[in-house]
Image: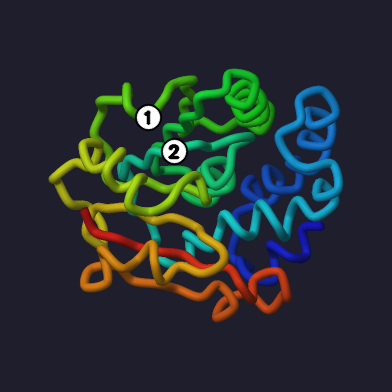
Amino acid sequence: MMELIDKYFPHLQPVQREQFAALYDLYIDWNAKINVISRKDIGNLYEHHVLHSLAIAKIINFKAATSVVDVGTGGGFPGVPLAIMFPETHFHLVDSIGKKVRVASEIGAAIGLQNCTFEQARMETVKEKYDFVVSRAVMPLPDLVKLVRKNIGREQHNALPNGLICLKGGELQHELMPFRRSATLYSLSDWFDEPFFETKKAVYLPL
């Protein structure tokens, strides 16, 4: 399973490789108790969930002390893989469903993530400021922007201005219309060879 991660991220530290390798058994175990990934899809954990999350690491190399909030994290995607990839960046994983937050939290604790916090909340109630918001297909882009604009801090740390990075699939022309001058659209197939990524996109929007 780790071959897929090594293929695209060959320079991981030993501790990062161990953390990524541990995810499979942990998600299999937790998913049997609390369904956070489709039972048909759990065998594709590394391709459809871990590597998909890590597409964000192809867009930006988060600097140390950057703060990132993962909106609608579900069982911990993209937040948990990104927290492994960027151990000096702080990630706050938010979901409105408590049992999903519990799975993400327990898995983070099991692999020894020190740079992750978890919260059961609706994003409307989260007031803290972050450098970046990340998400994976939680809602249409205009709705997401409206929801998280208040959470973007002004102080800049990274090569890209603070903003939103979200993973999307399907037809995005309509969603992107209000942001066509400011948004950058990435095709994940430019980075990853697997057929799964042929229709997958990422959007970066400075806010």
What amino acid type should be assigned to the residue bearing mark 1? Met
Q: Is residue 8 left or right of residue 1?
A: left
What amino acid type should be assigned to the residue bearing mark 2? Val
- Tell whether label 2 touches label 1 (CB within 8 Å): yes
Name which residue lies at 59% across and 65% down.
11
Location of residue 120 in the rendering, given as x and y in whole percent from the top left corner: 49, 20
Location of residue 102 in the rendering, given as x and y in whole percent from the top left corner: 62, 21
Quadrant showing the N terminus: bottom right
Q: Nearer the viewer, residue 141 or 93?
A: 141
Q: Dot 2, how many residues are within 10 Å of its Cα: few (below 14), some (14-19), or many (20+)?
A: many
Q: Which mark is residue 10?
A: none
Location of residue 124 in the rendering, given as x and y in whole percent from the top left corner: 32, 27
Residue placed furthest toward the left? 154
Q: Is residue 140 left or right of residue 164?
A: right
Secondary structure found at label 1: helix
Please determine whether, in this image, residue 67 is positioned above or below residue 50.
above
Please determine whether, in this image, residue 167 is positioned above or below residue 19.
below
Q: Quadrant of residue 133?
A: top left
The residue to which callout 1 is attached is 123
Q: Is residue 126 left or right of residue 136?
A: left
The residue to which callout 2 is attached is 71
Q: Quadrant of residue 28?
A: top right
Q: Nearer the viewer, residue 69 or 141?
A: 141
Q: Nearer the viewer, residue 37 or 63?
A: 37
Q: Earlier in the sequence, mark 1 or mark 2?
A: 2
Name which residue lies at 42% across and 66% down.
59
Please determine whether, in this image, residue 197 is positioned above or below residue 122.
below
Label 1 – label 2 distance at C-alpha? 7 Å
